[in-house]
Amino acid sequence: MRSNRRIVARLLIPIVALHVAGCTSYDKWKEGRPKTYFTSGKVLLDGKPVGGATVTFQPTEEVNGKPGWAVTDENGYFKGQTFDPGDGLTEGTHRVALKKAQLVDRATGKVVTEVSSDAPLKEQHFVPEKYNDFSTSRIEVQIKAEKNILPPFELVR
């Protein structure tokens, strides 16, 4: 019975030590990061959810703010992230850009998933191009030091 305890102890001690060491180095990596706050929302185009759209957040104050982003699910919902998945956004005002596009072969009209030739390509936009840029989208959000559930981004063609 004692030998089983010794074996278990010999196995657990290195595992615990590695775990503690790993957590410590991860915490050091996180040092100096600004605090982030849970942020979620929804993207609608003409009243319908937009899945697979990239939502980019650019803080208007560069001092403490950091850029963030998200990708919408099939129902148009997203959770913002700055450093880690779902960690949220930094506090303050953020400009918003939204994009969903794919590459299309100009000659055939077929969707291109891999660029392997010099065929002329064009971007086919599923979200109007004015929303692709912070300056033309005219969308801003205020992220507070709390849980942020944003009102839907209601885009129109």
Image (cartoon, rainbow, N blue to C red):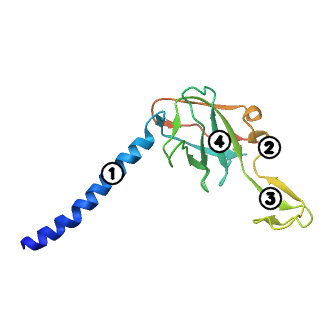
- Specify the amino acid type for callout 1: Ala
- Residue at figure coordinates x 17%, y 64% from the top left: 9
Is 103 positioned to the left or the right of 106 in the image? left
For marks 2 and 1, give the CA distance. 48 Å
Pick whichever, 121 or 23, lies toward us: 23
Q: Which residue is mark 4?
A: 56
Q: Nearer the viewer, mark 4 or mark 1?
A: 1
For marks 2 and 3, give the CA distance. 14 Å
Is 96 positioned to the left or the right of 119 in the image? left
Q: Which residue is mark 2?
A: 129
Density class for disc 2 (Cα within 10 Å; few <14, some 14-19, many ≥20) is some
> Which quarter of the figure has residue 74?
bottom right
Density class for disc 4 (Cα within 10 Å; few <14, some 14-19, many ≥20) is many
- Specify the amino acid type for callout 2: Glu
Q: Secondary structure at mark 3?
A: strand
- Please state, as top left, top right, bottom left or bottom right, where the C terminus lies in the image: top right
**Residue 114 visible in the shown view:** yes
| Mark 4 / mark 1, whichever is N-terminal | 1
| Mark 2 / mark 1, whichever is N-terminal | 1
| Mark 3 / mark 4, whichever is N-terminal | 4
Q: Give the answer, above or below, for where 61 lies relative to 9.
A: above
- Residue at figure coordinates x 46%, y 34% from the top left: 32
- Specify the amino acid type for callout 4: Thr
Q: Which residue is mark 3?
A: 103
Q: Which residue is mark 1?
A: 21
